[in-house]
Amino acid sequence: MSLIEANAFAFSLATSLMVSIVIFRAGDGTLAVMPADEYDGDNSEIIGEIDPHAA
């Protein structure tokens, strides 16, 4: 998934689930997204975070 697709997917998830979503680089080099509270990987692999409650 490209960075543009990952950002769009993360924003969509964040606004529909109303939870923070992280965009991270998976072990194979691809980008993925998941809820921030479920992410237990290396913090250095996080590309960005979408918080629907941020101003």
Image (tube, grey):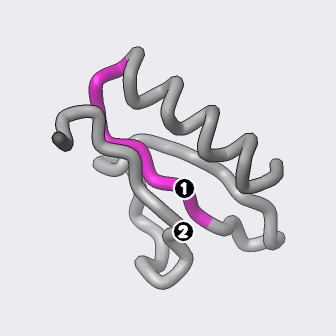
Q: Residue at x 39, y 46 (%)?
A: 50
Labels in figure, total? 2
Above/below status of 3 relative to 52: below
How dense is the environment of label 2, judged by Cα within 10 Å: few (below 14), some, or many (20 and up)?
Answer: some
Q: Position of residue 37 (x, y in %)?
A: 29, 48
In which image quadrant can residue 26 be found?
bottom right
Left or right: where 46 falls relative to 49: right
- Residue reaching furthest to the front: 55
Task: State the CA–CA distance, disc 1 to disc 2.
Answer: 5 Å
Magenta-tinted stretch: 17-24
Please tell me whether mark 1 sits on a helix, a strand or a loop: strand
Circle 2 is placed at which residue position? 47
Q: Position of residue 19 (x, y in %)?
A: 29, 32
How dense is the environment of label 1, judged by Cα within 10 Å: few (below 14), some, or many (20 and up)?
Answer: many
Q: Residue at x 52, y 24 (%)?
A: 12
Q: Position of residue 11 (x, y in %)?
A: 49, 33
Residue type marked 2: Ile
Q: Is residue 23 magenta?
A: yes
In which image quadrant can residue 52 be found?
top left
Q: Is residue 34 magenta?
A: no
Q: Quadrant of the C terminus?
A: top left
Q: Earlier in the sequence, mark 1 or mark 2?
A: 1
- Residue reaching furthest to the bottom: 44
Q: Are marks 1 and 2 in contact (CB under 8 Å)?
A: yes
Q: Position of residue 24 (x, y in %)?
A: 58, 63
Above/below status of 36 relative to 35: below
Please tell me whether mark 2 sits on a helix, a strand or a loop: strand
Above/below status of 32 relative to 28: above
Residue type marked 1: Ile
Circle 1 is placed at which residue position? 23
